Image (tube, grey):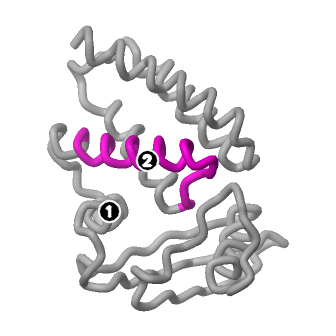
Amino acid sequence: MKKKNSQEFVLVGSDAILFMERIIAGMSKDAQPSQRQTLDFDRIKKLKLTIRKQMSVPQIKCKIKWLSETPNDLQEEATSSFQHDRPEYSLLKKRLNKLYRLIEKYLEQGVLPSNVEMELFCRHAEEMTTYSGYGDERYPVFLDKIHALREAYLRVNIQEFRKVFSDIAVLKKNCHRDV
């Protein structure tokens, strides 16, 4: 069983390569400004990587142990995201809102969120659509926007990412107004 201060995830293909670049940038003293956040090594106690190449595609399995001082909100979101328990709707909504505000701050700074934050946001957003009675008729459009957000993120296209994130904000506002 995973401890509360750790998480695991797997990245494949170009995501794996970008993740390695971000690790290097985060560890480098002469890091060049990037549109993506580097990993926050001040919050990481241990980072373990297993790197493989399967059928000519790079694959990275990452295990992160957070310092005990890691803020509980993001740590909680990360660890619960990789568990298969279905949280209460209100808890999931709270987690998603925290990530939403965090991504807004990154966009104000002109950067994209980290892979971990992006993955958490998309997973939570997709999981929100499994609860009935909260705007079910809007779920297909919302899921399309989440997919488009992922695509913009993978292309490191901050302008497209901002546009899609703005579309998601409008959907969110309209749904919350009507529900």
Q: 120 or 139, which lies in front?
A: 120
Residue 97 located within the stretch drawn in magenta: yes
Q: Residues within 10 Å of mark 1 (few under 14, many from 20)?
A: some
Q: Which residues are magenta?
A: 93-115
Where 119 falls versus 37 (above or below)? above
- In the rendered structure, the answer to whether residue 15 lies left or right of residue 66 reads right
Which quadrant holds residue 179? top left
Asked if residue 132 lies in the magenta stretch, the reply is no
Residue 1 in sight = no
Point 27% across, 18% down: residue: 176
Percent position of residue 51, x then y = 67, 84
Label 2 sits on what residue type? Phe
User: Residue under circle 2?
Assistant: 121
Q: Quadrant of the N terminus?
A: bottom left
What element does badge 1 sit on?
helix
Q: Secondary structure at mark 2?
A: helix
Q: Which residue is mark 1?
A: 74
C-alpha gap between disc 2 and disc 1: 11 Å
Q: Is residue 169 above or below residue 46?
A: above
Instruction: State which quadrant residue 53 falls in.
Output: bottom right
Query: x and y percent of residue 45 in the render?
Result: 40, 90
Name the amino acid, label 1: Leu
